[in-house]
Amino acid sequence: MRRIHVGNALSAFGLGFTVPYLYVYVAQVRGLGSMTAGLVLAVFAVAALIVLPFAGRAIVRRGPLPVLLAALVSAALGSLSLGLAGNATAVLLAAAALGAGQAVMQPALATMIVDCSTADTRSRAFATQFFLQNLGLGVGGLIGGHLVDTTRVSSFTLLFAIEAAMFLVLVAVMATVRMPHSPRMDDAPAPSARGGWKQLLGNRAMVQLSVLGFVLFFACYGQFESGLSAFGVEAAGISTSALGTALAANTLMIVVAQFAVLKFVERRRRSRVIAAVGLIWAVAWVAAGYAGLGHGSQEMAAAAFVSTYALFGLGEAMLSPTVAPLVADLAPEGMAGQYNSAFALVKQLALAVGPAVGGPMGASLHAPYIVTFLLFSLGITALALRLGRRLTEVQDQPWLRTSRVVARGEAPAESLAA
């Protein structure tokens, strides 16, 4: 588990070097224009959507570690190629390799955490993962910002080389991991193998959680660097420095509050924790609305906007020890990789649709934008409470387990009737 957490931190640290500067690198430094830069961001999403359905089956059949190592090699090659690419075709191919590798890392690492944790330690393990990811991204972005120089292509090549090196270091670290035995599907009959997705879609609780997950990622993560930032600049007149402060406040809230929040949520129903996040994010959207639509001073608007990002961070800290362990508890024995990949696919869909919808709205339809996503946040609360009625007692309240094995899959009919 320690190696897995080190791996999470290293991969996030490497990504932090390049993610904030990717658009500038492609559009301005390489001189390929905003259209190509936009295509690069789209390629990341498309590559993820293509590979994730296959990643789940590969994790189930071969185990998460071989899949993770293959993803890391792909990401390292893509990152290094991106730093050296000088034309649009090379940039797009490199972005596809990097995007596919990054997408597969997430469910592979999540499945490794499931296999290396117990029901009692899983929430803390996922909270630690989220904490280290944000810390790594923040530190990587801070260091990268001091190394980068938009007048020198070589400075960006250095950033991508560092990112590739982090992935290769992670390969070396992960190669030393000896995973505990977990069920595989190698000996399963052919109909069972082909029916993995059908079985997942037949799990009503997982389908409801996936719908809820789509709304979560669409209404929060899908707006961070698109609709919400556009709203802040266009409606509230937020400066780039204030926007940077807001993003820093989000990361700082997660880093500072994560383990304090963990103690609070560990003994609460998971469905009610997610419902509370919806209410917190509703308050965040009200604060954003005040920043852009209120008539206060510029300082008050900036403070409200920073508070919006901080409140989003608080909600994220509550979700990290809640949602991922719930996905694992809903998965039948040996199917955690399939379920993690499916949930990652839902996340990628939301992150692709979110900016496309929120960006234009945030830039021009200011009041409808705030009202729309305020309603989405309240919808999170309603969906979470509805999901709670579908979960078994131990899925919603995992601390009720004693010596029993974790209840997995669909809630039994008797439990639902009760």
Image: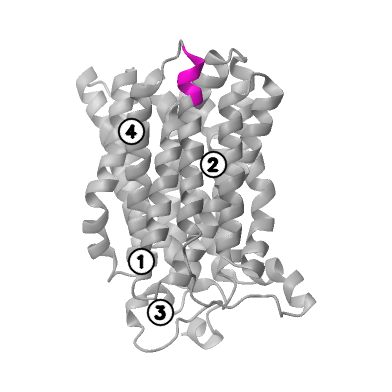
Cα–Cα span, label 1 and label 4: 25 Å
Residue lying at the far top in this picture: please name it: 151
Picture quadrant where residue 233 is located = top left
State the residue at coordinates (39%, 75%).
118
Query: Residue 360's x, y, as percent?
Result: 53, 25
Cα–Cα span, label 4 and label 2: 17 Å
Q: Earlier in the sequence, mark 4 or mark 2?
A: 4
Q: Earlier in the sequence, mark 3 or mark 2?
A: 2
- Reading the image, the residue beneath label 2 is 351
Residue 329, placed above or below residue 31: below
Residue type marked 1: Ser
Disc 4 and disc 2 in contact, CB within 8 angstroms? no
Residue type marked 3: Val
* Element assignment for label 1: helix
- Reading the image, the residue beneath label 4 is 247
Residue 81 in the magenta stretch? The answer is: no
